[in-house]
DNA sequence: AGCACGCCGACT
DNA sequence: GTCGGCGTGCTC
């Protein structure tokens, strides 16, 4: 190895690497490569570097140069962590594109892209100095506290000290203690990824010969009967499996580990440790066959045709039209051509149900990647994609970051789902759009599938940028559910409504129950009542943080803020006037559940909302109960609109559709349509005819009308038409500046100032800051300024650099104090 | 992201 | 006076 290195011409050259650090910093940093690592460094490998005073970080090599930096002395990199790159150069390009497109730093993309176990950062550890001779009686209070704590727990972190002292700034104290030789301060990095090890037993090949084996057995039986048992058990197990694990053998034979150890010492057994995957699934059947319906076959042909000309096809298929079967066929084709496939699903849709279904066809070729996986599991998926062990990855939005190198097909199912967009930490990316870009890099084809496509995708399809394929009938000849709209006002007038349930809905529920079928009721609000009001003085309890009324939750007997999570005890007496006449206004899922139980006492009713699914496994338990028919009626919020697919749910009741018809933003109609269509789509899946009852005060509403007619095109066209004269843009790119501040007045000034600056460059493209209205999340008020860019030759690169400049310039003004500006990009 | 440095109000 | 909060700037 050493000789090899000496032969390399690079041996005596001084190399430098430019690395990406997983931090919100715009620049790359240059480190010097120690000579002995000259042949080890490579683009895409991870290195450990010291950055700043003491911290160690994992960085990724972006570039190797021989040019020494002029203005400073580069530090040496400390360690190269990988034998071969874990990040491909294609990925590095992708990271840079993403950072540019979504106005953030490459480091932030890296932080989002790498599984946590691949990006270790050092932790500062504080220990007592064993050689330190100090007089404890001379210590300050704080120093004494720290020394005391270290006596009990020898290693503490900085955050431990922060908690211990109850103050935010602890470094000066620690530093002075370090100077006085009382404590040690060190930086520790530990590899967080640990392969899972398992011990396997092998028989010494000597005993493969029958005579030898017989001799051994006789010998053992006489002197060590337990060992003979173990040998017998081994022989039995090895007949069916090539590798016998220690655990299996112990279980089969009933002997202890000590017996196996003795056999290993006698060199009868050879025990070896192997890394095993946490991801192995052995129950699957490959290539189960299914027939496509004529409609599906036509659609498949159409998609193939589109792919000749176009890279992206929007598959618009009504619920239960059998989109998944088409995906499976397309995946098979891609695999046949030796390509990799990325199959994106929204997080909530990644249920074991879906995963099992696909694993049935693709067996262990398929990898699954989502946030419920542990760190170690994610690293294993990452490595298996790198090694081409996985040809198909089924995953949530973050799987666009996996190290593909020969992608042939990308499927984005439920393309309209807003959960593809990451909101809070940068990069604020949309996985659907990122995936389309990624596919472009590999000349891969993209399928966007949805029953209710987003307007931007539908726009792209109708204007010819994407191919458009439609599936208008349900699979298996089942017709779409019958939708009945019931006027609540009318029922009130006729006095036939009971509580929140119209006579129509009640009849349908009763029919379903008598047929042993199930019902889902949709109410888009959790809790019991959203407003509590004093009838004497009109006092309403409000959140101390958010200034919104608190929702009464009967089950917990608390008043909750649905914005920030603040809660307080329920009140029986008005704190303002002392009156006991308190009225509950409005209603939520809890009240629907309660009232219905009174009306239909012998039905089994369950509730599915944030409150009932918070506990671990609660969501899955509810699904199981529904599947196994321990629930007759499920009352739920938006949560029931997605992913529920049960054959016996034949009736869907929308308690009050009006709450879905008035979203406060400019995509209101699109969202209303999506919610109504999705909820309705739960009725009569898997073969049974379903019925949907929509209760509303607005039976003539345009969106309801189009849900009934299942006519997306109409809604879309009227929407487009209206937006021509609308101050908010239709489907061009929007850059959004979210401006946050704790003080609403200051926020207003800041937003105004920024808008004026932006208008100097972009004129009337700048919208706001009047839209949206000031929102408030976790103590911060938020305002947005939008910039719309139509396809009129504006260089978005230039636009972004101007925006960056304006933000930087703004931050030098005194006005910017306490203000957080977050740029975001939306793809319309 | 940390961490240091420097400024400023509130306390022993 | 100085301690601790907070804003600002730098890290190869």
Image (spheres, coloured by chain):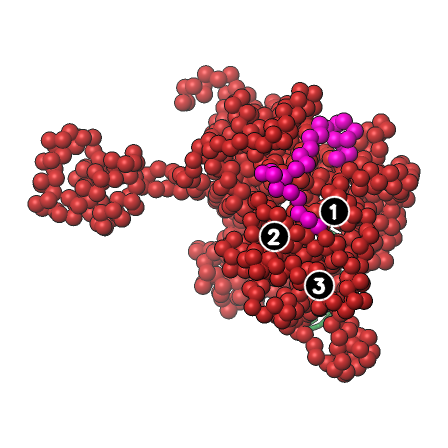
Chain colours: A red, B green, C purple
- Highlighted magenta segment, given as a residue range: A458-483
Residue lying at 49% horizontally and 28% vertically, measured from the top left? A388
Compare residues A726 and A58 and report the one nearer the observer. A726
- Mark 1 or 3 closer to N-term? 3
Compare residues A410 and A135 and report the one nearer the observer. A410
Are the numbered discs 1 and 3 placed on the same chain, yes or no? yes
Q: Is residue A441 left or right of residue A120?
A: right
Would residue A786 be counted in the magenta stretch? no
Tell me if residue A801 comes above or below residue C1 in the rendering.
Answer: above
Residue A650: image tag: 2
Quadrant of the frame with the N terminus of chain A? top left
- Mark 3 or 2 closer to N-term? 3
Cα–Cα gap, marks 3 and 2: 17 Å
Residue A73, can we see it? no
Residue lying at 77% horizontally and 64% vertically, measured from the top left? A491
Residue lying at 66% horizontally and 37% vertically, measured from the top left? A473
Which mark is in front, 1 or 3? 3
Tell me whether circle 2 and circle 1 mark residues in contact (CB < 8 Å).
no
Compare residues A411 and A783 and report the one nearer the observer. A411
Q: Which residue is mark 1?
A: A708
Cα–Cα gap, marks 2 and 1: 17 Å
Residue A757 occupies which quadrant of the picture?
Answer: top right
Tell me whether circle 3 and circle 2 mark residues in contact (CB < 8 Å).
no
Residue A503: image tag: 3
Which chain's residue wears label 1?
Answer: A
Residue A102 occupies which quadrant of the picture?
Answer: top right
């Amino acid at each position: 190895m050493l000789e090899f290195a000496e032969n390399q011409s690079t041996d005596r050259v001084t190399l430098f690497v430019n690395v990406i650090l997983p931090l919100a910093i715009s620049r790359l940093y240059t480190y010097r490569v120690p000579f002995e690592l000259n042949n080890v460094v490579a683009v895409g490998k991870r290195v450990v570097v010291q950055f700043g005073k003491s911290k160690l970080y994992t960085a990724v090599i972006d570039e190797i140069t021989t040019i020494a930096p002029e203005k400073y002395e580069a530090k040496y990199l400390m360690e190269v962590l990988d034998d071969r790159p874990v990040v491909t150069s294609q990925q590095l390009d992708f990271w840079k594109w993403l950072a540019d497109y979504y106005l953030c730093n490459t480091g932030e993309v890296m932080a989002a892209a790498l599984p946590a176990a691949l990006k270790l950062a050092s932790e500062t550890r504080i220990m007592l100095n064993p050689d330190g001779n100090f007089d404890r009686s001379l210590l300050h209070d704080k120093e004494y506290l720290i020394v005391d704590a270290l006596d009990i727990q020898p290693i503490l972190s900085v955050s431990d000290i922060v908690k211990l002292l109850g103050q935010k700034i602890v470094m000066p104290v620690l530093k002075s203690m370090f100077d006085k030789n009382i404590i040690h301060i060190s930086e520790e990095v530990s590899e967080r990824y640990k392969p899972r090890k398992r011990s396997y037993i092998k028989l010494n090949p000597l005993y493969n010969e029958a005579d030898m084996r017989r001799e051994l057995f006789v010998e053992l039986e006489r002197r060590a009967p337990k060992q003979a048992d173990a040998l017998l058990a081994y022989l039995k197990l090895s007949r069916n499996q090539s590798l016998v694990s220690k655990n299996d053998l112990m279980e089969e034979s009933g002997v202890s580990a000590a017996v196996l150890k003795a056999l290993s010492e006698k060199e009868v057994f050879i025990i070896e440790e192997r890394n095993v995957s946490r991801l192995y699934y052995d129950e699957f059947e490959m290539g189960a066959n299914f027939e496509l319906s004529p409609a599906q076959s036509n659609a498949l042909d159409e998609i193939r045709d589109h792919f000749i000309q176009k890279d992206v096809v929007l598959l618009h298929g009504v619920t239960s039209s059998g989109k998944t079967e088409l995906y499976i066929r397309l995946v098979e084709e891609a695999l046949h051509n030796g390509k990799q496939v990325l199959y994106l699903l929204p997080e909530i849709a990644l249920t074991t149900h879906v995963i099992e279904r696909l694993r049935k066809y693709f067996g262990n070729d398929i990898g699954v990647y989502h946030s419920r996986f542990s760190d170690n599991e994610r690293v294993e998926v990452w490595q298996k994609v790198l090694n081409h062990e996985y040809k198909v990855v089924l995953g949530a939005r973050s799987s666009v970051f996996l190290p593909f190198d020969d992608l042939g097909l990308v499927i984005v199912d439920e393309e309209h789902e807003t959960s593809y967009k990451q909101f809070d930490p940068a990069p604020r990316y949309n996985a659907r759009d990122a995936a389309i870009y990624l596919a472009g890099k590999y000349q891969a084809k993209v399928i966007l599938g949805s029953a209710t496509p987003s307007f931007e995708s539908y726009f792209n399809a109708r204007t010819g940028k994407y191919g458009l394929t439609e599936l208008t009938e349900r699979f298996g000849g089942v017709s779409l559910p019958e939708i009945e709209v019931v006027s609540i006002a009318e029922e009130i007038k006729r006095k036939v409504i009971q509580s929140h349930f119209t006579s129509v809905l009640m009849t349908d529920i009763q029919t379903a129950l008598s047929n042993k079928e199930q019902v889902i009721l949709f109410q888009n609000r959790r809790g019991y009542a959203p407003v509590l009001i004093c009838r004497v003085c009109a006092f309403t309890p409000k959140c101390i943080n958010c200034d919104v009324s608190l929702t009464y939750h009967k089950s917990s007997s608390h008043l909750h803020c649905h914005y920030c999570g603040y809660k307080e005890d329920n009140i029986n007496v008005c704190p303002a006037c002392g009156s006991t006449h308190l009225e509950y206004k409005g209603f939520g899922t809890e009240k629907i559940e309660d009232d219905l139980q009174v009306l239909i006492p012998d039905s089994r009713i369950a509730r599915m909302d944030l409150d009932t699914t918070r506990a671990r496994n609660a969501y899955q338990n509810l699904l199981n109960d529904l599947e196994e028919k321990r629930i007759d009626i499920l009352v739920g919020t938006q949560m029931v609109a997605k992913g529920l697919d049960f054959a016996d749910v034949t009736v869907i009741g929308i308690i009050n559709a009006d709450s879905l018809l008035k979203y406060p933003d400019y995509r209101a109609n699109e969202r209303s349509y999506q919610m109504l269509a999705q909820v309705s789509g739960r009725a009569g899946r898997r073969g049974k005819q379903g019925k949907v009852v929509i209760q509303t005060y607005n039976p003539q509403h345009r969106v309801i009308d189009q849900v009934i007619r299942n006519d997306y095109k109409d809604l879309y066209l009227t929407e487009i038409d209206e937006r021509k004269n609308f101050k908010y843009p239709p489907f061009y790119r929007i850059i959004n500046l979210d401006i946050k501040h704790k003080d609403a007045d200051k926020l207003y000034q800041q937003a105004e100032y920024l808008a004026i600056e932006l208008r100097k460059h972009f004129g009337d493209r700048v919208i706001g800051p009047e839209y949206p209205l000031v929102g408030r999340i976790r103590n911060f008020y938020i305002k947005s300024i939008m910039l719309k860019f139509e396809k009129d030759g504006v260089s978005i690169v230039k636009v972004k650099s101007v925006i960056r400049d304006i933000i930087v310039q703004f931050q030098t003004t005194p006005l910017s104090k306490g203000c957080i500006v977050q740029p975001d990009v939306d793809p319309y």
